[in-house]
Image (spheres, helix red, strand yellow):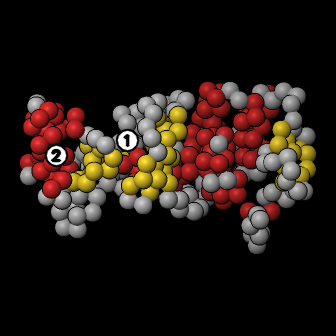
Amino acid sequence: MKTYEKLLQLGVFTINDVDALYGNRNSAASAVRSLLKKGLVTSIKKNLYVCNDLENKAPVADRFKIGSSITKDAYISHHSALEFHGIGHQLFFEVYVSSRSVFKTFEFGGMTYRYIASKTEEGVETYNTNRGVRVTNLERTVIDCIKDLDKAGGLEELLQCLRLITFLDSEKLMKYLKIYEIQFLYQKAGYILEHFKEALQLQDSFFEFCQKNIVKSKRYLTYKDDNNLVYNSKWRLFVPENLFAFTEPGGDELV
């Protein structure tokens, strides 16, 4: 039980963690087999395990802890990070995990853990919940979701999530935009966040920054063949007409 109690402090562990306790690989492997047989731990995937609660035998770690433990540099990102921060409009049964170390997408406990290549660790923080979870902070999460709308649940889902946020740090937003240095991202971020400027307490300098980094190219926020597109000259974007109508009181959702 001493081994179990020590591993319980981690929640999710690998054979290397057990080896650190025993100092012997064979003894560590034998200990894991014993814990599995007793139902004290469950195998998530090859060389990744989760401790189970003694009473109900359910995993003690949630999807966020599991996701951020898949590799040494893994962290929760995109829509999964929105959910972690409590502003996901819908609950998804997949967990977006960014990492520099590649892993194959897999399923566990009814959740799909999907790999995303990490571009930077700026804005990744460790939150002291459920034995420590690495997640992108709110500003990095918003920029990532605007960058990769498909990993945000789509444009409508992102807009619904933005309605639930009360503050974003303009300086941090600019920092992450600068790291990516993608013109289309400056356009999208400026256009989308301008609608929530007052609600998010965004500074004028943020939008000036976005505009300064836009050149002459015109882009489509959604798809070229979408109906009822209008051109926004300020952000040089073709956007759905009345895109934000559903975010207003009594507004209908996009279809």
x 46%, y 53%: residue: 112
Q: Nearer the viewer, residue 163 or 106?
A: 106
Q: Position of residue 232 (x, y in %)?
A: 89, 44
Left or right, 157 with respect to 117, comes to right
Q: Position of residue 98 (x, y in %)?
A: 49, 38
Q: Distance of mark 2 from mark 1, alpha carbons? A: 18 Å
Q: Read off the residue under disc 2.
A: 32
Q: Position of residue 161 (x, y in %)?
A: 62, 57
Residue with the most extreme bottom position: 250
Q: Position of residue 242 (x, y in %)?
A: 85, 59
x 83%, y 38%: residue: 219
Any part of residue 146 in sight:
yes
x 86%, y 50%: residue: 225
Q: Quadrant of residue 101?
A: top left
Residue 70, numbered label: 1
Question: Mark 2 falls on what kind of element?
Answer: helix
x 61%, y 50%: residue: 152
Q: Amino acid at mark 1?
A: Ile
Any part of residue 76 in sight:
no
**Within-10-Å neighbours for mark 1: few <14, some 14–19, many 20+:** many
- Nearer the observer: mark 2 or 1; the answer is 2
Q: Earlier in the sequence, mark 2 or mark 1?
A: 2
